[in-house]
Image (cartoon, rainbow, N blue to C red):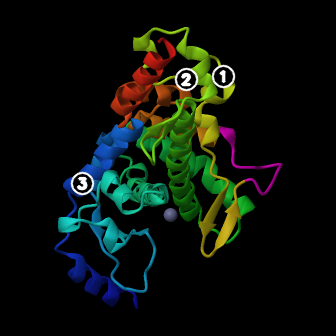
Amino acid sequence: MKKIIPVVLLLITISPTFAAEESIRDFANDLQQIFGIEAKKTLEVGSRTRFAPPLFPSNTAEASYNPVLNTIFLKKENLGANNYVKSITALKAMEPVTYPVKISTIFHELGHAEMDQFVLNDITVDDRALHSVFTNEITPWVKKNYPGVNPKTLFHETYGYYRGSVIETMFNDKATIEIYNGWNSYQKRCFFNPDLKAKVMTMTKEDFAQIMYPENNSAWEEKYSSRFVPRYVFIQGKDVDLMKNPADPFKEQWKKAIWNYFSQNYRSPSNMRELAVYFKTHHQDRNLIRDCRNAFWDESHK
Ligand SMILES: [Zn+2]
């Protein structure tokens, strides 16, 4: 009862902010452009979610989700005109080194909205499949292993951290691919690393100008489904270890179910090699990389 009045006040305060996919369009399109994480689902989530600056200055979180208001509150600096979430390009321009943390946090919070609006609302076949894993398998497991923890909260956070891990892993892989390709993305400079030196005399100029990846390298082949693993989730002021009980850890088949849901809805590359293949046609610096490589090739074939 005591919560009702503040909620009404908050609703009045943020009522000019309507849920609309425009509010997340630039961010979603950049996610697709940068990593091949399809924008469609993010736009659908955006069409059912409000975005607003924090109601209280004391809230310094990068982003947070309020299920009652169905609102993602973001630091003012992360919002542009009409409370639209800024594009990743704009967020990067603001914080060129640490922006991946911002992106990961915003994507985590969007996961909470998706969980409430889609998964637990049984909108699609995929939603129903993941919802049923939660109800029939994860809920009893939480009750048995984590007394006092609300199963829904734990599932929500696990999905949020999973999505955070998607973004962090893909940013790390992007950096690995760039190093392998002799590209310094901060300084927009190329370097002629040993891998490239070993290849320049054996390749045509055209092939050498492409973004490359190693053949049959297990690290580049390892599936994201086994790499995206949330282990610690922060709930009610403390870390919960999903693997706390070695005899009864968070199950592989549940990780698989979360991956299936993610991959069905976002159609991202499924390992680092696929991300590199995607970069051949989509990396934002691919033209600069090609120019550098052409110069290396010409220099080496003089
Ligand atoms: Zn969360």
Residue 165 percent across, percent down from the top left: 56, 49
How far apart marks 1 and 2 lie (CA) works out to: 9 Å
Quarter placement of the N terminus = bottom left
**How many labels sit on residues?**
3
Residue depicted at x 49% and y 28%: 276
Nearest-to-viewer mark from 3 and 2 = 2
Left or right position of 131 against 294: right
Q: In the figure, 71 relative to 58: above or below?
A: above
Q: Where does label 2 land, which residue?
A: 213
Residue type at mark 3 is: Ser
* Residue 297 counted in the magenta span: no
Furthest toward the right, the residue is 247
In space, the residues marked 3 and 2 are separated at their CA atoms by: 37 Å
What residue is shown with label 3? 47
Q: In terms of sequence position, does the residue under pointer 1 or pointer 3 come before the other?
A: 3
**Dot 3: within a 10 Å radius of its alpha carbon, few (fewer than 14), some, or many (20 or more) residues?**
some
Asked whether 247 falls inside the magenta stretch, the response is yes
In this view, the residue in front, 295 or 137, is 295
- How far apart marks 1 and 3 lie (CA) works out to 41 Å
- Ligand 1 lies under 8 Å from the Cβ of mark 3: no
